[in-house]
Amino acid sequence: MNVHSRTPTLSAHDPRGLPVRTVDYWRTEAVEPAQTRINRTLHDVAGRAVAQWDPRLWSLHMSDPQTPANLTSVYLLNGQVLRSDSVDAGMQIALHGVGAHVLFDWDSRGTRRETQHDLMLRPLAVFEEGDSQPRLCVERFMYGQPDTADPTRNQLGQLLRHDDPAGSLLFESFSISGQCSENNRHFTLDPVLPDWPEPIDERARLLEPGEGATTRWRFGPQGQVIEQIDARGNRHFSEFTLDGRLRASHLQLKHQTGPQTLVSDIAHNADGQVTQELAGNGVLTALTYRPEDGRLLERSAVKANGAALQLLRYEYDRVGNVLSIEDKALPIRYFANQRIDPVSRFTYDSLYQLSEATGWEAGAASQGPESLHRNDPAASSNYRQSYRYDESGNLLELKHVGMRSGRKLVAARLSNRCLPYRNDVPPTEEQIAAAFDPRGNLRALEAGRSLTWDLRNELRSVTPVERASGLNDIEQYVYDGGGQRVRKTRELHTNARVVVAQVRYLPGLELRIDSAGEVLQVITAQSGLNSVNVLHWESTPPDGSNDRYRFNFTDHLGSTCLELAEDTRLISQETFYPFGETAWSAKTEVSYQAIGYSGKERDATGLYYYGYRYYMPWLQRWLNPDPLGGVDGLNLYQMVNNSPLVYRDEQGTQGSSVTESPRFDVLNESETNALNQGMHFDARGLDYFPQPLHEKVVAGLDEGLSWIQNAQSALSSKDLSASSQKYLNLVFGAEYAANRNESEELRTALLGSLQRLGSYMQQLKGADSWRLSLVQKLSNHAVGRTVSNNTQKKQIWLSRDHVESAHVFSLARTLVHESAHAMYNYSSPQRVDDIWYLRIGKLSEQASEQDIENFALTALLMSAERIEDGPDEAKMPGNGRADYKGIIDGFQAASGGGAVTSAAQRLTLFKSNLAARRNVILHNADSYPGLLMAFRNKGK
């Protein structure tokens, strides 16, 4: 028996099919009895999750009912969250308008935010105030209007100017597909929060003088960037294959007459995985995958003379957990009577949390924010780390056997906020409470190293050294309107002078300036699997040489392991502990390297910047709660579910597997069952559809998205047009028009659903295109089907015959229908089922405009017929019938009525209760294309 034997995951559902309890079994040793871990969810009568407990708080709740849930939520009638209370992230309230847009929001820090919109519900201005900040206009937006937009630059309707906390960003030109092809960034005079006045000429007074920093792009037919000219005139070119995969990348510095190749000869296997690429310095990276499941087996970096610089070999267990990583390019070392093999090994508990790791390290006196590179690479030794987690997933104890020390944390009794032991003394509950603000932001890295946060819960500054004189060392950060860091300033005080260093982040370029007069361009380029930095000094280079190319080679997580010069000379080398601290490093010269673990920037504070959060590798935790909430679980500080060899967090919000490719030909349970029933998959993932069918599906998605955009625009208008009101009357019933409150609720709910639907369909064209599969023939002559499985959630299967023979308009109808199913997980109370069908057939490829007109009109008339007659439970599919009953019964219970005992009673309630009817229709997949086809662009 092993540690995973008899440790299933069990789920309990209520009569509505909603999950109310999930039971896991945890242990770290096979001989231990498994402990029960229960996650509990409470739903309201409408099926929405109103309270969620993790195993630790649920256990406390069982003995003390006053124990709060990890997350409690209060909803609007349309399903949007009005208020959420998190034990980690505090309280948040959002007031939405009729178009599902946020008008006001508040939080437990006392932050108050107002967003003003135009008639098209686009944001115009954002005002913020808090307990320590007066009311400021922190953002303003300006759009291309018919009388001011330049049609030759495709500016009409586009965002042309965005004044944000960092300065002003001007969008000068757009491609025909709407992508920005030229922007101009102006920074504020000082790195402080601006208060933007309304007149544009007054805004200019807050900005640095000059022309700003202009970046230009040129796009290919599939939307990929084929050329970028950065703010200093350096040109970055990319070459792509016919199916849109990167083939080569080149860089031409402004003063150069020709380009330098960064990477070339990028090759892919039949599953789209990169098998090799040749760096501009002649180092060949090659990758080998296991044919059964596509997992990476070997990754090497070899010089032109055959010398191996990196030779990583991976081993996995059956579910994809990394068991070992060996670098065969490194020598076996001997030190202090130890043999040090260049191999790391990992073991996991029954929840797939990392429980133990072994490897090699270089000694260091201590760990923490300032411990970076305090080691002697020659003084290597073996280490063993073991990890102890609580029921919430907090890593409370790291035991280290080796040349370094471990550490312990204490979690708050009723949250996941944690503090480390100080001098072997655990923190008290009061100390933990005082160490965090009401939104869960940590106030200090350690004693004397304070942190400040802006009202958006973005780290504003770190004070590495505090002095009684008040002349503190400080590092400050400024973010743009999207929450991305664009400016960093570090100020150090010495006896003789003040040293100021600044970094400005622009697309593909970092500008580093210091008070000594050094001006350095760091041109950054992602060259396939690896990356390249070019160091160009505008001032005198430190050693006389300029334009230094630095080629960075990574591991499967994107961590920078090797830094090589243009002549393949080794600049630096680094290995990491599983959770990101530096275990071993060696440098032969100053590297200017800021990229480390997971491919992220490492600040002088020791923090890693991920995009939306900062990570503390010495504590294996995030600095503050996840801004997206519980997308990765109820513990908002936990790093990638405590499985850092398997998952990687790209932006500090959500982990994703790096050992599994969802597009690789490894069958999930739905596909296995289908194959056993004789079904055949022609392509799994839109990228693998035959080219004509790929283009047709993309056209169908674009057609459906145009319906959604037109409907959103029409339904967001203050006064509905006669045609829009007619469409709503046919699909939902004419009674809504006579009831203002119900009419507003309908529009709010519908716009919210359309926003979700449009976002999902947009993802199907990009990151989630792997969710689409092409099937030779579906059962029951279906043209599409949405399936769900435990690992990959919802996927959409399309009939090949339908894709080949149907008109794009008809295919768009299918894609909208199936996307409505797929946009919510099966366990979501907002999931969309098949309660009734609009059986209108399909359009052939030869369909005329009149045929399309009749097709859309028939859908509207059949919708109206369904409203007049009401749903027929006898004809409903099983899931649709359960959903229908749950909605009607829930509204009856909420109104205080008695139990519904018959189909006739439910039919009466459907016809008489407008709120219940609205919910039923929004839970029916065919209702979406039935309505949206009426908003098509006619005459196309």
Image (cartoon, helix red, strand yellow):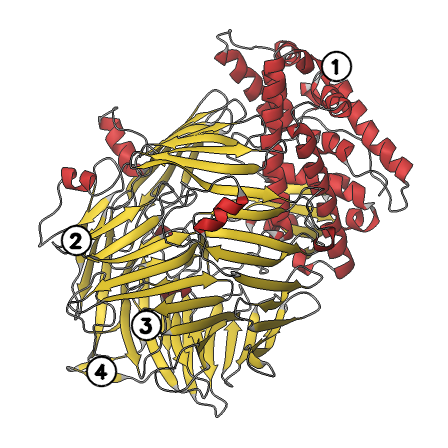
Who comes first in sequence, dot 3 or dot 2?
A: 2
The CA span between labels 3 and 4 is 14 Å
Q: Which residue is mark 3?
A: 575
Tell me which label, 4 or 2, sits earlier in the chain: 4
The answer to which of 276 and 183 lies nearer the viewer is 183
Query: What residue is rendered at 42% in x and 62% in y?
Result: 504
Question: Marks 4 and 2, how far apart in space?
Answer: 41 Å
| Crowd class of label 2 (few under 14; some 14 to 19; many from 20; radius 10 Å) | few
Marks 3/2 in contact by CB < 8 Å: the verdict is no
Quarter of the N terminus within the rendering: bottom left
CA–CA distance in space, label 1 to label 3: 69 Å
Which callout, 1 or 3, points at the residue further toward the start of the chain? 3
- Mark 1–mark 2 distance (CA, rounded to whole Å): 75 Å
**Quadrant of residue 737 within the rendered picture:** top right
Q: Position of residue 489 (x, y in %)?
A: 33, 60
**Rendered image: mark on residue 470:** 2
Res 776 seen here? no
What amino acid type is highlighted by mark number 2?
Gly
In the rendered structure, which disc, 1 or 2, sits on the residue that comes first in sequence?
2
Q: Which residue is tagged 4?
A: 378
Dot placed on the residue nearer the N-terminal end, 1 or 4 = 4
Residue at 73% across / 51% down in the picture? 151
Q: What's the distance in space between the residues labelled 3 and 2, CA to CA?
A: 38 Å
Q: Is residue 554 above or below residue 39?
A: below
Asked whether residue 406 is in view, the answer is yes
Q: Which residue is pictured at 55% across the width and 21% down the height?
A: 886
Q: Hey, what amino acid is under mark 3?
A: Thr
Q: What is the spatial separation of the Cα atoms under label 1 and label 4, in whole angstroms?
A: 82 Å
Image-based side of 493 in relation to 175, left or right: left
Q: Which residue is mark 1?
A: 868
Mark in the foreground, 4 or 2: 2
Query: Label 4 amino acid?
Result: Ala
